[in-house]
Amino acid sequence: MSSPAENAVAIAQSLIRCPSVTPLDAGALDALVRPLSAAGFSCDRMTFSEDGTADVDNLVARIGSGGPHLCFAGHTDVVPPGDETLWTHAPFSADIAEGRLYGRGASDMKGAVACFAAAAIEYVTERDGQVPGTISLLITGDEEGTAVNGTRKVLAWMEEAKLVPDHCLVGEPSNPRVLGEMIKIGRRGSLTGHLVVSGQQGHVAYPHLAANPVKGIVTALAKLYGTPLDNGSTHFSPSNLEVTSIDVGNPATNVIPARAEAHFNIRFNDNHEAETLKTMLEDSVRAALSDTELTFSLDFAPHGDVFVTKPGALDELLSEAVTEFTGRTPVLSTDGGTSDARFIKDYCPVVEFGLTTETIHKTDENASLSDLETLTAIYRRFIARYFERFGDGSLENNNGR
């Protein structure tokens, strides 16, 4: 009989061999359903659509009934591999070499999906299918893309089906360098702005007959950069604004352009809400251009909200399991980019713990076999302790892993 770690590697390999570049499924959910169904999980597949976006396949697998309900959330879609000739091992080969599993998604995050599936299967198998509550897996194929037809809509489906979890663990890669360093208990919000400054085109020799928008946009951006948004908060580092592009579209060197535009992104903490932040930015730009003839527009893309799960029993249970198998005490962090936890937090407390971020989205993405084994053990212990803490854990074998 295969060990949980061996099952995790086998499931991870079967997932990686599916070229599920967003929004394609490419057989990835089938590869996950097979072992889960064999262990007694009920698997609901759902495809969501929306005008202007690609259809996306999603999965909710569950076993047990009632509460407490522990949900694992993850994704089987991956970013494109780029130039495949640069890979030492083909991106969808799932090769194992020198103690590492190679392939797109090995760390982000097919590896963690496989580890939780293997851990849950072992837990359920040891208990002859009897769970003192509910274990579910919410798996989407739309995390790396627009996130329109994925987790958000699956959660709405779960709510309608009266399957909302009590707590959720997201398996995103959370550790910067080594397994056990960090648990994510929140995420900063993300706000992307598009600033357009309009002036009057003219000849560079006659600037008094023109209104240069380049000067205006530089002044406006300098004001945005020069005003600190905040000094951080209890659980968050200071918010930051970064300009990502400045474009004029003017090939002539003797013409003052009529228009200049810039894109920027702000990662903001819980000192702000998106709407008040938008107003503050508009006021700053308006003040910067107040003594000019220039006009401007400032538009914003849909944003991700800031959130934090207050430290408590959930992260304590996870930290204990992490320390038991790694010897490290993980830091509770809110750093990094956004994740689907931003949707889950509207339904239940959520924390994130997975593999390392060292090779995610890179050529030769990989995960060590030892990390996959350890992560499976951590998840297995966490599942057991969860039901001991939040439910009737009298059936749990306290020596089980």
Image (cartoon, rainbow, N blue to C red):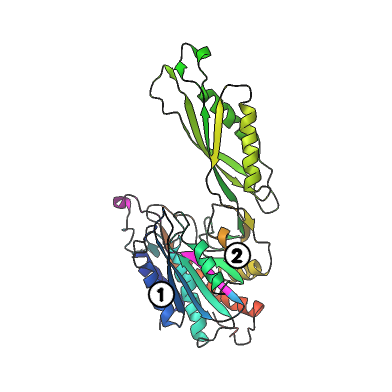
278 on left or right of 82 = right
- Looking at the rendered structure, which numbered label has been put on residue 33? 1
| Mark closer to the chain start, 1 or 2 | 1
- Give the x, y percent position of residue 84: 31, 52
The one nearer the camera, 53 or 3, is 53
Q: CA distance from mark 1 to mark 2?
A: 24 Å
Q: Is residue 226 visible?
A: no
Question: Mark 1 belongs to which amino acid?
Answer: Val
Over which residues does the magenta segment extend?
70-89
- Give the x, y percent position of residue 146: 46, 54
Q: Quarter holding the C terminus?
A: bottom right
The one nearer the camera, 337 or 94, is 337
The one nearer the camera, 4 or 54, is 54
- Looking at the rendered structure, which numbered label has been put on residue 350? 2
Determine crowd level at label 2: few under 14, some 14-19, many 20+ residues with C-alpha closer than 10 A: many
Residue 217 lies in the magenta-colored region: no
Q: Residue at x 53, y 57 (%)?
A: 339
Q: Residue at x 58, y 68 (%)?
A: 168
Determine crowd level at label 1: few under 14, some 14-19, many 20+ residues with C-alpha closer than 10 A: many
Q: Is residue 365 visible?
A: yes
Under tag 2, what secondary structure? Answer: strand
Question: Mark 2 belongs to which amino acid?
Answer: Val
Under tag 1, what secondary structure? Answer: helix
The quarter holding residue 109 reads bottom left
The quarter holding residue 395 reads bottom right
